[in-house]
Image (tube, grey):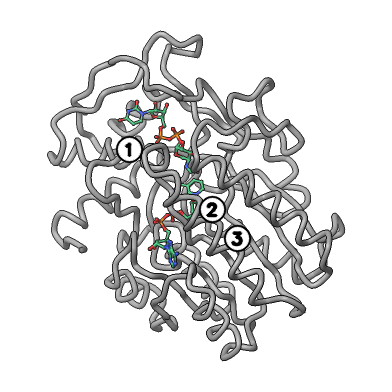
Amino acid sequence: MSKILVTGGTGYIGSHTVVELHHAGYTPIIVDDLSNSNMQILDQIEKIIGVRPAFHQFDLCDAAKVADFVNSNTDIKGIIHFAASKAVGESVIKPLKYYHNNFFSLINLLQAFQEKPINFVFSSSCTVYGEPDTLPVTESAPVKKATSPYGNTKQVAEEILAETAKAHDNYRVIALRYFNPVGAHKSALIGELPLGVPQNLLPFITQTAIGKRDKLTVFGGDYDTVDGSCVRDYIHVVDLAKAHVAAIQLLENGNPNGNYDVFNVGTGIGYSVLQTIAAFEKVSGKRLNYEVGPRRDGDVVQVWGDVSKSSKELGWTAELGIDDMMASAWAWEKYLKENPIG
Ligand code: NAD
Ligand code: WQD
């Protein structure tokens, strides 16, 4: 079956996608510089799928290395490009790190495939919608001015891809706009591995429950939402991984919408922070130590996606709900306590 290059394949979403590509009959090849992941994840993937995926460690910002790799792997049929720096807060402090890494890696890959037919799936984000005017937000909603350099890299990367696909027939591109990826593989062998203090809600919840953090602060309880806390569309990482397989398949079969397309990848359901905590407490049987604190600067109040286009045209729908998300995230945190990685 086709070889698919998975950049960032030892990272959180990449590792789950490597597993789902294998299950769908593809041969994933990973490129990762391990700047935000760990070589042990390869062992973990091998435990799940029974084979060790091909792995190449280098920085995609190195144009010569990317060109060498592409020239010696001429049978690659598709790319799923996860590799990027992703911490919103850090991007405000170190904007050049984000512009450098997220743009050079993308442009080097595109240039290395000049003239060669290539199916390209890009990791975009619902962050491009900012605070949407209408909910659920559809793919045709306006892209709002980014509030962080990280968010800006996603917006501009989408433009780079759209313009490149328009100018050159050989690039067939789908950008997937993820809502909030959470959870872990059902084996609890792979999951999210945050560096240092987690900035995202789910790892903060599970680390608090396991005793690594004292207390979770809910950022704001006075918003105009169902219960005053912010609302998000959480998506199980395994469902998200399967959306990438669906995107590769749509590109292989010829996307009737043309060379560049965009899809929302979420469940279409919004949960507040307090509802998410309640779901975690229910499935884990643990009381979470939390308090409602001040708002976090720059937070979107509420966002959830319209996923009808993904369902109709990508042929993909999320199957796992909030309980599976919480249970698998919790199982992974408990696994990590017994089997530390990194
Ligand atoms: P991650 O940090 O776990 O994975 C990214 C991987 O890319 C890491 O393994 C890192 O070592 C690697 N990498 C980074 N720069 C590289 C480079 N120059 N060369 C080679 N490897 C490099 O992140 P993730 O959560 O799996 O996110 C994957 C993608 O999805 C990113 O593009 C991210 O912006 C996007 N995304 C993530 C979320 C989220 O909440 N996790 C939401 C929307 C979009
Ligand atoms: C979720 C909710 C917080 C931590 C970020 C990026 C976005 C995308 C996903 C990549 C919010 C609340 C959180 C805590 C809390 N990434 N929260 N206490 O902000 O939706 O999106 O990650 O593209 O671009 O901005 O995700 O997990 O940080 O927060 O109350 O300790 O949990 O206020 O309402 P967010 P998150």
In this view, the residue farthest toward the front is 96
Dot 1 lies on which element?
loop
* Residue at disc 1, CB closer than 8 Å to ligand 2: yes
The reply to whether residue 324 is in sight is no
Q: Say which mark, if any, is on residue 199.
A: 1
Q: What is the quadrant of residue 117 in the picture?
A: bottom right
First-in-chain label (2 vs 1)? 1
Q: Residue at x 77, y 78 (%)?
A: 115
| Residue in the foreground of this view, choosing between 98 and 316 | 98
Q: Is residue 70 left or right of residue 221?
A: right
Q: Is residue 208 visible?
A: yes
Mark 2 residue's CB less than 8 Å from ligand 1? no
Residue at the spot 32% in from the left edge and 69% down from the top edge: 41
Q: Amino acid at mark 1?
A: Gln
Q: Which residue is mark 2?
A: 240
Amino acid on which disc 3 is placed: His
Question: Mark 2 Cα within 10 Å, few/some/many (few <14, many 20+)?
Answer: many
Q: Which quarter of the rendering shows the N terminus?
A: bottom right
For the residues marked 3 and 2, what is the alpha-carbon distance in whole angstroms? 7 Å
Secondary structure of the residue carrying numbered label 2? helix
The x, y position of residue 342, in whole percent, is 20, 63
Q: In the displayed structure, would residue 169 be above or below residue 264?
A: below
Residue ID for mark 3: 244
Q: Dividing the image into four equal quarters, which quarter contains ligand 1?
A: bottom left
Residue placed at 60% from the left, 81% from the top?
A: 3
